[in-house]
Image (cartoon, helix red, strand yellow):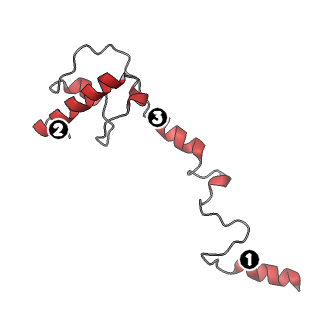
Amino acid sequence: MAALKEEKANNMPRRSGDSRQGSSRRGDAKRGDARGKRDRENEFSERKTRVTEKITEIDFRDLNLLRKFVTPHGKIMPSRLTGISAKQQRKIAQAIQRARVMGLMP
């Protein structure tokens, strides 16, 4: 009889406040779905690029240089991913903003 009740309870839809085993607000991160921390790190490791060449002059008209510091979505990459100093990052950000105002970059 008890086994029949358990079977019925397992087949019933869960309510939002139900605290039965297996219900997790984070989804299935514990089981290794795409929401896990390891998967998020792999997602960012594909984009991780360090600029190895020396930057001597930063100009808003130098689009080849500025594109190295912008993601495919058009966002300015943080300096921890590009590997440049804070001073250079501020100059890069200013140059990208000027190029956007001029209509040279998205």
Report, in whole angstroms, how far the alpha carbon at label 2 lies from the one at label 3.
26 Å
State the image coordinates of residue 48 (x, y, percent, origin top left). 44, 31
Label number found at residue 10: 1
Residue under the image location 14 percent in, 26 percent down = 61
Name the residue nearer the viewer: 8 or 51: 51
Say which quarter of the image contains residue 87. top left
**Does 87 sit above or below residue 97?**
above
Name the residue beneath numbered marker 2.
100
Residue under the image location 73 percent in, 76 percent down = 10
Q: Where the C terminus falls, by quadrant?
A: top left
Report, in whole angstroms, how far the alpha carbon at label 2 lies from the one at label 1.
56 Å
* Dot 1 crowding, Cα within 10 Å, few <14, some 14–19, many 20+: few
Kind of residue sitting beneath label 2: Arg
Say which quarter of the image contains residue 75. top left
Kind of residue sitting beneath label 3: Glu
Name the residue beneath numbered marker 3.
46
Report, in whole angstroms, how far the alpha carbon at label 3 lies from the one at label 1.
41 Å
Q: Secondary structure at mark 1?
A: helix
Residue contact at pointers 2 and 3, CB within 8 angstroms: no
Kind of residue sitting beneath label 1: Asn
Q: Earlier in the sequence, mark 2 or mark 1?
A: 1
State the image coordinates of residue 103 (x, y, percent, origin top left). 12, 38
Residue under the image location 67 percent in, 53 percent down = 30
**Does 77 sit above or below residue 28?**
above
Residue contact at pointers 3 and 1, CB within 8 angstroms: no
